[in-house]
Amino acid sequence: MNTIVLQRLKEREKELNTLYKLDELLSVHDLTSTDLFTKLIEFMPLGWQYSAICEVRVKFEGREWASEDFRETDWMQKAELIIDNSICGEIEIAYLQLIREFNGSQFFPEEQKLLNTIAERVSNFLFQQRLRNTLKVLKTGNENSEGNGNGQILSQSSSDQHWKWRFRIAERISLLMDFERFGVKAVYLIGSTKNATAGPASDIDLMVHHEASGQQLNCLKSWLEGWSLCLAEENFQRTGYQTPGLIDLHLITDSDIKESTSFAAMINAVNDPARLLK
């Protein structure tokens, strides 16, 4: 086999092993930032071509973690940590000396892709962790329920805890939603949560009145998808019911309201009207 091809295959193997280690690290939900970044800088160099001279530094929300010999050099690459569309930090890779350049760079193009992938996965982990922490703040002691391995509820102290929990979450989401950034005009609650009839497998039905551009709409959907997935996991821990997501999003426009089409007809309706959250 060609020597260059063999070398590239070995490098791809190193990259895959690095991603496996990352997935294993991120499987621990209660991982602190210090533990996360301390362990990250330990194994990341193993994924790069010249591991012996590869150093790592992570900057996150005013704090910094770096490998022992890290210093800024002429041979560096970085990727940003982006949480909820905000840059919160960055991961930097530095080679301490020049060994050999390829097309004007000492880094393979695949190594920048690897760094971007690591930064994206770490960012997603931190975002999900923040959502879980928000849910913990919203919890009350008498809301917990227990489930068995078959997903059946063993006990339920109060039949109205499902809708109350979901209602508070809906209020929290609408409060945190950046209307200007997402092009949103109003948020309404409909369905079983609004009607106080939600069960352990019920969705949170949100109706969003928007005038968003395509990019704004994609950002809005991504933001709510993060909430939806995290809430589904929280609901599973509470009840034993598994769902692909807990938020059912209904988008309406000025035209829908004017013509009273679809869900827009529920605004100011006489029977079963939508509830304005914000």
Image: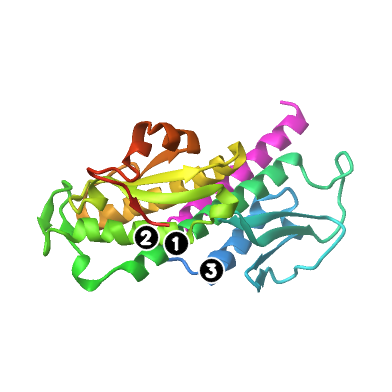
Total marks in image: 3
Is 137 situated left or right of 85 in this image?
left
Asked whether residue 60 appears in the rendered view, the answer is yes
For image coordinates 25% across by 44% down, the residue present is: 270
> Which numbered disc covers residue 258?
none
Reading the image, the residue beneath label 1 is 175
Do the residues bearing badges 1 and 2 touch, measured as CB atoms within 8 Å?
A: yes
Look at the numbered disc 1 and give the secondary structure of its residue: helix
Q: Which residues are magenta?
A: 1-27
Position of residue 89 measured from the top left corner of the image (x, y, whole percent):
66, 63
Position of residue 99 measured from the top left corner of the image (x, y, whole percent):
86, 51
| The C terminus sits in image quarter | bottom left
Q: Amino acid at mark 2?
A: Glu
- Front position in the image: 25 or 265: 265
Position of residue 86 measured from the top left corner of the image (x, y, whole percent):
62, 58
Location of residue 266 by image quarter: top left
Q: Amino acid at mark 1?
A: Leu
Do the residues bearing badges 2 and 3 touch, measured as CB atoms within 8 Å?
A: no
